[in-house]
Amino acid sequence: MAWKRSWKLLSIDLWDSLRPLGFDIMLILVGAVSGVFSVLQPITTPANAANSVLGIIIFITALYLALRASSDLVNLTQAGVMRVYMTYPISRRNVSLILYFSRVFIPSIILLGIPAIVTGVMLYPVVGRNLLNYVAVWLAYILQVQLYGSIFVLTSTQTKSSGTAAVMSIVGYFAYVATSLILSLIGSIDNIKLLTQISTSMEFYNSVYYKITGAVISNWELVVSPIVFVVLFLSYVIYFARRFES
């Protein structure tokens, strides 16, 4: 059956994506950072606990995915592995989904999940007050990373050089973050509410955090990032299925 063949290919590619030693080092790093930050900062609410720690970890995760997700896909093409994947008896769409799951989704779940667990255990007296809010902020970070990951894998389909793909992914990530910061700064200085709202909407975890903490936030600010992610993700899948050449 198609799903069994897809599952087999996913397990093969996932092992390649999470192979030692690089990913192991990342797990140790994010675990240590989350432990340190969870005890150094004055944290009083579950949402604040998640936001304080994951705000640092998302930067590490995004850079890791920018370097690995985009460049790895190009390396698969250069090594001829992608051509083998394409001859596997499943659709190109399924191959694109498998590559996304193994190179972006599952690594981001692990890299953001370990800090969430470490912080939840170390600060359980705080986190336990409202576990739902804690999980909601964590899921918001997960979605934001999917947005970045979609940029990275889409970039990888447009270049044949792993170095170029990695650089373009990193530049794209920093450009996105810088745009959000600049809009927030200008909006605050000139008291332009719309610019501040756009900045908040670009970072889904901020929108969710503000909503949970009772800040006044428009509903459209909560849907901008999810919509951007869906557009980028579908663009990647459609391009891979119809035009990508291995």
Image (cartoon, helix red, strand yellow):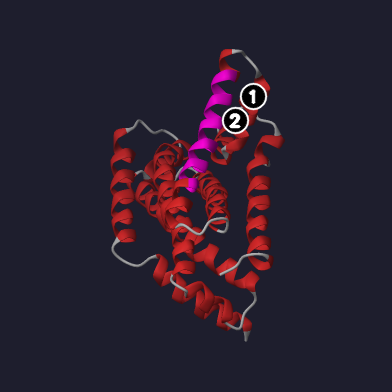
Q: Main secondary structure of the magenta part?
A: helix
Q: Is residue 228 visible?
A: yes
Q: Position of residue 144 (x, y in %)?
A: 55, 46
Q: Is residue 216 visible?
A: no
| Res. 6 image quadrant | bottom right
| Res. 44 image quadrant | top left
Q: Which mark is residue 118?
A: none
Q: Which residue is mark 1?
A: 195
Cα distance in 3D space between marks 1 and 2: 6 Å
Label 2: how many Cα within 10 Å (few below 14, some 14–19, many 20+): many
Q: Which residue is mark 2?
A: 199
Residue 39 is covered by the magenta coloring: no
Question: What segment carries the magenta color?
Answer: 168-186
Residue 181 is covered by the magenta coloring: yes
Task: In this rendered view, identify the residue nearer to me: 212 or 157.
Answer: 157
| Res. 221 image quadrant | top right
Q: Secondary structure at mark 1?
A: helix
**Residue at 48 percent of width and 62 percent of height:** 74
**Residue at 42 percent of width and 58 percent of height:** 110
Label 1: how many Cα within 10 Å (few below 14, some 14–19, many 20+): some
Q: Position of residue 228 (x, y in %)?
A: 65, 45
**Residue at 42 percent of width and 42 percent of height:** 59
Task: In this rendered view, identify the residue nearer to me: 101 or 91.
Answer: 91
- Against 60, residue 5 (above or below) is below
Q: Amino acid at mark 1?
A: Leu
Q: Position of residue 162 (x, y in %)?
A: 44, 57
Most distant residue in the top direction: 190
Quarter occupied by the C terminus: bottom right
Q: Amino acid at mark 2?
A: Ser
